[in-house]
Image (cartoon, rainbow, N blue to C red):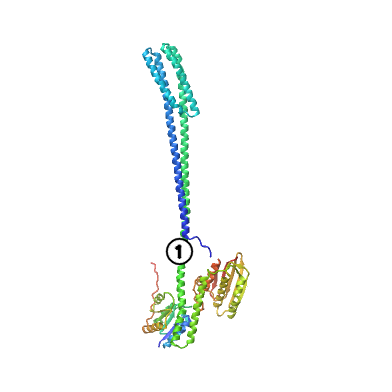
Amino acid sequence: MASLLIVDDDPDLAELVENALVHEGHDCRLAQDGREGLALVEARWPDLVLLDVEMPILDGPDMAQAMFLRNCGTENIPVVLISGIIGLPAIAARVGTPYFLAKPYSLSALSRLVTRALAERIPPHPAPPHFEVQL
Amino acid sequence: MKSCDPCPTALLGKHTAILRGGFAMIVLAFLLSNVVAIAEMHSAAARERRLIDRAFSSVDLISRITRDVDQQRLLIDAHIFTSAPEIRKKIEGTLGSLDADYAKAIRAYDPLAKSENERAAWQDLRRAIATAMARIDKVLALSRTDQDAEAIVALEGQFGMVDQAAARLNQITRDNSHRCLAMMRDRQRDATILLAGITLGGTALAMMVALWVSRALRRAREKIHRDAALLEERNRELNAFAGRLAHDIRGPLTTIGLSAATLNKDVPQDDKALASMQRAAARMETLIEDLLTLSRIDAQGGEAVADTTEVVGLFEDELRRSVIAVNGKLRVDVEPAELACRAGLLRQVLWHLGQNAVAYRRPDVALELAIVGRERGRTYQFLISDNGSGMTPEEVRRAWEPLYRGERARAVPGSGIGLTIVKRVVDSCGGTVSIESAPDRGTTVVIELPRT
């Protein structure tokens, strides 16, 4: 059993995912945006964060970046990006996580990815910011 | 639909035709001017040549006549002073051949004397010669009888008149030749001036045509660049639209799929899964309806005349109920007028903006929505203002993009197409629409529409 944090601004979808993962024996908490997600991470570190990309107030990549920059252990929490956005692999590469799931997905695909992420626990390694230096 | 500017290809075709016509005219003008100038110069040269030939012939013939007359004088003198009859006979023979040559010269000169004064001088010379010749027979007769003194007296003065008449004719011929030459030079000068004028005119015309065509081509090129940039922008918008559409459809599709799987697996809370599925289906339906509305705006038929009060009456009650349901206030103050827009489309515009005001109200502030319509000269202005959550400048800038939803707007259900529909309708009616907004201060949408 693992502690999971689901961050998604679609409450129906978040509840469905929660319901399915609870059914598999995980402990799930829900947040509707990145800021709320960060607060829940601070309150108790989850084993895995399931993160939507486009959200109000603070979006998924920015929340992952904030977790990385805090550098007090939250940077080691693996992140699964879940979205229907075009170019999700590129966004996942920018965030630095090997785990991403494109919508629409099946429960089995979700379950497999969560199991894999919990087994590997590879933390995000964001690409270093690109600076243009003029000499 | 607003009529389009001529397309760049047609513009280029038109300019190419004008370019070809212009240059054909220039080439024709140059060819014509050269032909005229060459013909004029050839004509002048031929006339000058004829004039010179005639002048030479005249001088030659007059010299020949005077030479013959001088020879006759010398021969008569010899006839008088000699006493040998055989010499006299020989001299008389020579005089006879000189007469024949003289008559030939006269025949040759006669057609050359054309001007009045020249003919008069020529007649004088002929008369003087005839007078002299008439005396010669008498002189010869006196000489044959050795009456030399009488012969000399009879001859005296006769040839002086001939010399004077010949000199006068020579002078007239020379004057006439000089005058004609001066006239020829004038004509040559005129031809040169004509050629220079045509050349300068043609060059000026060529430069004007080239300038005009280069300007026209530059305008066409600029239009092509503008159109290409617009097309590129439209392509980018289309790509972004396709991406956002895919995203907005995949969300509810995932919800439906997971709900179905949940129901199938007999997971607890089946009712919730069913409700989620229904809501996701409703979201997709709204999205599809809005997309269809957007795509049909330009295709809608009917008379393009809308009565403002009638249009507002179509939705005012329903909108008022929505506003009162959230404890808000609605103020409608619309001057009656007829606008050049379809009533159904105008209703959609005002309805969408009213619904937006309800949806994006501030939770802690009672909604105040006002729809005001005023005539402004040849146009009519609608002001739809609220005290809702407002928009950032970036959100205002991107508000018309299809499916775009501001960061805070995403928390409220919606398709993100409403404002796109508003903009498309106003554009199709030939009007303008703008947004004045600030976060947590409210929004005012200003619409200007043409009156009938």
Viewer-nearest residue: B165 or B384: B165
Q: Residues within 10 Å of mark 1 (few under 14, many from 20)?
A: few
The image shows residue B178 at horizontal and vertical percentages of 46, 31
The image shows residue B134 at horizontal and vertical percentages of 46, 17
- Looking at the rendered image, the quarter that the C terminus of chain B falls into is bottom right
In the image: residue B142, left or right of residue B336: left
The number of callouts visible is 1
Res. A53 image quadrant: bottom left
The image shows residue B254 at horizontal and vertical percentages of 45, 80
Dot 1 falls on a residue whose secondary structure is helix
Q: Amino acid at mark 1?
A: Ala
For residue B50, say whether it is visible. yes
Vertical relation: B235 (above or below) B69: below
Viewer-nearest residue: B225 or B127: B127
For residue A77, say whether it is visible. no
Vertical relation: B370 (above or below) B58: below
| Circle 1 residue | B228
Vertical relation: B438 (above or below) B130: below
* Chain for disc number 1: B
The image shows residue A36 at horizontal and vertical percentages of 47, 82
Viewer-nearest residue: B416 or B290: B290
Vertical relation: B204 (above or below) A107: above
Residue at 48% across, 46% down: B201
